[in-house]
Structures are given as structure tokens and as C-alpha cells.
Amino acid sequence: MSAILYGLLGAALTGIGLFGLLVRTEPLLRILAFNLLGGGVFLVFGAVARRGAAAGFAADPVPQAIILTGIVVAFAATTLAVALAVRIAEEPGDAPGAAPGADQPPDAP
Amino acid sequence: MMVDALLAAAILAVALATVAARGTFTATALFIGYGLLLAFAWVRLGAMDVALTEAAIGAGLSGALLLGAAARMRPHRVALDRAPGRAMTAAIGLGCAGVTAALAAAILLLPDPALSLAPQVAAQIGTTGLGNPVAAVLMSFRAVDTLLESAVLVLAVIAAWSLAPKGGWGGPPGLVQPQAQGGPLALLARLLPPVGILVAVHILWIGKDAPGGKFQAAAILAAMWMLAWMAGRTAAPPVSARWLRLVVAAGPALFIAIGLLGWLAEGAFLAYPPGLALPIIMVVEIVLTASIAVALALLVIGPPGRRA
């Protein structure tokens, strides 16, 4: 049954995203991993929606609506995280360990 | 089944490649592919509304946002946490495998027959006048969720703008885009917006009876605005512009006002008077589309930068 298959895929994506979130150190890669994780969670919920197909609907519409809401909220959170990451990166000299100038090589003392 | 297995394998491969990618550009490109493949998975799961949203927002707008951020952050050295050592990485991998195993077990142990709210939706959808069950849930049965979500977008815009650096407040959001002279960007920025706006209006209107609706339409409208903005054909209005703030807040404000009127007239927040549900829902949808479109575009464009 395809619902189970996609549910298991969602479970795998959740694990992969969580791993990336914890192991990668670059802020943008962490944000990406967090979105992978989110996609996995939505897919698990989508499998539940598909199993709930009834009354002539291809999938239970209530979880679908919640997933839709979730995607938009996740996007809003992502934009905020990205704005924070960019702001920290562009802050001159304030970020600990950051090179003071943009033109210096990354390994400058 | 074969299609599903291949699609699942492709999604898994792209997800693994995204996590393993070295550079942020590579990872973002892979992530856009992941979002598009995921949209196919939603089609296979019978969730067309989610598929449209995933393709437009999960892949499209997120992709544009992250590519822009990758370009802006490249010249800067970001303070990095120390990467976990080999033993720690193994332990994290083990823990994440445990999470996956627990979720997989939960999927396999779901009750049979499956629980579903679909019969209730089918029984009550007539009261809304809508033909699309997902739209009925979003705008009527669980309208409070949609109201809160539209408010989240307003809050996100406020939060993003508050990250404006010293001296940037009140200026135009994002980086100033030079006008594209020739090339595909300049051409597409002239050709696509009229078509895109037409498609968005269609998707908004058709959303009452078929997959579509305000989020998908708003994402397309936002993309069209950003295309014109990126090509330098239109300047983003300054964040101090009153009309801009009014447009962003209008949708949620109208939704709250309708909710309060329902409380006065029908005795429950967001209760629609019988017979008037469809016109009320469509008016809210149309105003929300405008607010969400502007909010989504502003979120991708980012906070105001330093003024030159």
C-alpha cells in the first residue's frame, strides 16, 4: 500500500533531517536539514491522511488542511531563521570568530 | 506501486545528498529538487492542494530565499560551532535511526480500519457552499487555524523587519537590485508576470471547487513580484510605507472582524450565518490572498539593508 510506503519514507526523512541538523555546522545547511525534517513529518501525516480516504475523498481533508498550514508556517520560520543567519554573518566584527572584513581569506588570524 | 518505489528512492537519495553536500549552493539546489519530488509524492497520496503548496512554497519560494542567502553569506566567515567528532557523529546517527525506527513502528501500527474525519467533512460540506473539501476545512471547519496562520505571516514580517541593521529602518527591504539589461532574467521579468497573475487568479477562484486556493495563488503572485523586483524593473517599497503595512495586515484583520461578527450574529467566533457562508469565505479568501502574497514576497526579499 502506497500510504505505508510514503509513511516509512517520511520516517526516514525525519531521521535524515535530524541528523543533518545536529551534525552540520553551517547555519544555512542546518536550516536546510530542518526543512528536510519538516518534509518528513508532513509526509508521515500525509500517509495518515491517505489511509483516511473515505466518503469519496482521495485522502482525509482535515490532515491535508493542517499540512498545508504547516508548510506555510514552516516557510515563515525558515525566512526568519535565514534573516537571522544573514544578519549575524553581515554584522561587522561582532560575531565571535568572524573575520572583521569581508575581503579577508577565511583562515586569516 | 513501482512508480511509488522509484519516487521514494529518488526522494531518499536527494535528501541524503542534501545533508551530505559540502557547499550551501549545492545543498540548496538539491533541496529544490527534493521539494519538487515531494510535490509528486503528494500527488501520489491524493493531496493535490498540498502538492501545489509544496511546489510553490516548499520548493520555489524557499529555494529563491536560500539561494539568495547563500550568495549573501558567501563572502562572510560565519562563526561555526565545532563539528562533532567521529564518536559523537556515530552516536547522533544511532539516535536519529532510533527516531526513524520509532516513527516507522508508529506508521506500521496505525489502527485498522483507519480513523478518518472525511465522512464528517462530506456530511457538512454543504453548509459552506464549497466543493473543495480542503478549502472547506481551511475556511470553515478549522478556520481558526487558518486565521492564526495568516497572523503568523504578519508576525514573521514584523520579526524579519526588526532585524534591520542600524540606519536601515524605514528603507526599502532587501538588497537593491540592479536593472537587468538583456538576458533571460530581463525577458522573463517582462513575459511571465501577466501570465502568472492570470494563473494565480484562476487558482484562487477554482480553489473553491478544485485543488487551489489562496496560499497557492499568493505564492505565485509573490513569485511574479519578486521576478520583477530581481530584474530591477520595480523597486521594493520602503518598509515605512503605510499602504504596505495595511496590505499585509488587511487579510488577518478582516478575518478577525468576520469572526467577531459571527460571534455577535451567531453566538460563536467565526460562525458564518447560514446561506452567507460562501460569499463571506470568498471575500476573506481574496483579501487574504493579497495579504499573504505581499507577506510571502517581503519574507523572501528580507529585512531592509544598510542605506548607502
Image: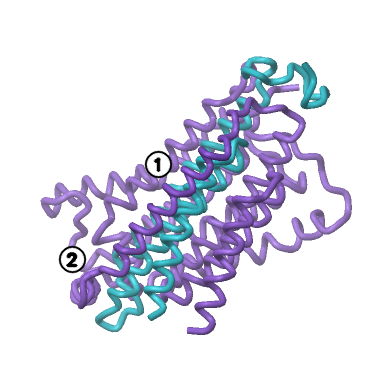
Chain colours: A cyan, B purple
Helix, strand or loop at mark 2: loop
Chain to which the residue tagged by mark 2 belongs: B
Position of the C terminus of chain B by quadrant: top right
For mark 1, what is the residue?
B152
- Residue B65 lies in quadrant: top right
Amino acid found under the numbered disc labelled 2: Pro
Image coordinates for residue A26, horizontal then vertical, percent: 62, 36
Q: CA distance from mark 2 to mark 1?
A: 29 Å
Residue bearing the label numbered 2: B274
Residue that protrudes farthest toward the left in the picture: B267
Q: Residue at x 74, y 35 (%)?
A: B74
In this orientation, which residue lies closer to the viewer: B225 or B119? B119
Q: Which mark is residue B135?
A: none
Chain of the residue displaying label 1:
B
Query: In the rendered structure, are the residues bearing label 2 and label 1 in contact, judged by CB atoms less than 8 Å apart?
Result: no
Q: Residue furthest front?
A: B87
Q: Percent position (x, y) of residue B129?
A: 28, 72
Residue B21 position within the rendered picture, expressed as x and y whole percent measured from the top left: 67, 50
**Is residue A96 something one can see in this rendering?**
yes
Q: As displayed, is residue B22 above or below residue A5?
A: above
What residue is rendered at 26% in x and 64% in y?
A: B277
Where on the picture, by quarter, is residue A50? bottom left
Inspect the image, locate mark 1, and give the three-letter code of the amino acid beneath it: Val
How many C-alpha atoms fall within 10 Å of the one at disc 1: few (<14), some, or many (≥20)? some
Q: Nearer the viewer, mark 2 or mark 1?
A: 1
